[in-house]
Amino acid sequence: MFGGLLAVTWWRPPFPAEQAMHHSLTVAGLVVLILVHRRRRLPFSSYALILIFLGLHSVAARWMYSFVPYDDWTRALFGTSLSEAAGWERNHFDRLVHLAYGLCFGPVVLGFLRGRWAPLIAVEVVLSTSALYELFEWGIALTLAPADAEAYNGQQGDMWDAHKDMALATAGAVLGVLVTRWWQRRADLASVCSDEASSKPAG
């Protein structure tokens, strides 16, 4: 499914060079995923979360994040644009992707960890990798022409763009980790209750 979505996003791309730049990290991420898979098979939920994020990233990369036409989509479906309904003055698809990064990768990282501090460490990993990505974007801004850097980074004139992106990724990680821990405890409790019920003598 992800392969099909990726192929569709490359059909007559409006910004092919910029899309290829964005997908350099997609390729790197897939290589890491393959290497991890060879050493340790992840649960299905982890693969699903990773591919959901990569799918959102692929859609965003097609339109350089800043020009994802979700207003056209909502106008066609509901007769009004999302930006008009929410009072937005910028394209917020990049915010969605950063939030999704935390939501998707917080639980994935948590799956590798054990112990009391595992949830906190998972959130910190998401925050630190999000910060590293913002530093990568800063490096892009230093090496490219100003117009090209703005097109790639998609700040849309917001001087606090990097801070907001990291905050959303962190918030997503906190939410994702909390939901995962709640689900795990619920499953553990159900398992204990089932074991107790099966161990009771009949009659």
Image (cartoon, rainbow, N blue to C red):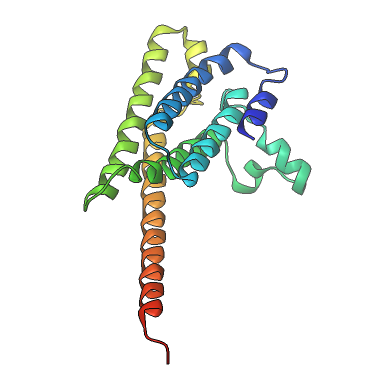
- Residue at the image point whose x is 40% and y is 79% from the top: 197
In the image, residue 153 lies at what x, y percent? 47, 21
In the image, residue 39 lies at what x, y percent? 37, 31
- Residue at the image point whose x is 30% and y is 37% from the top: 125
186 sits left or right of 69 in the view: left
- Residue at the image point whose x is 40% and y is 54% from the top: 180
157 to 123, vertically: above or below: above
Q: Quadrant of the C terminus?
A: bottom left
43 sits left or right of 85 in the view: left
Note whether residue 90 is visible.
Answer: no
Identity of the residue furthest to the front in this view: 202
> How many circles with numbers are drawn on the protein?
0
Q: Depth check: give the residue in front, 132 or 197.
A: 197
Identity of the residue furthest to the left in this view: 116
In terms of image quadrants, where is residue 64? Answer: top right
151 to 1, vertically: above or below: above
- Residue at the image point whose x is 40% and y is 39% from the top: 169
Note whether residue 48 is visible.
Answer: yes
Q: Depth check: give the residue in front, 74 or 112.
A: 112
Q: Depth check: give the residue in front, 158 or 200.
A: 200
In the image, residue 139 lies at what x, y percent? 37, 14
117 sits left or right of 2 in the view: left
182 to 38, vertically: above or below: below
Q: Depth check: give the residue in front, 190 or 90.
A: 190
Q: Quadrant of the N terminus?
A: top right
In the image, residue 128 lies at what x, y percent? 30, 33
171 sits left or right of 150 in the view: left
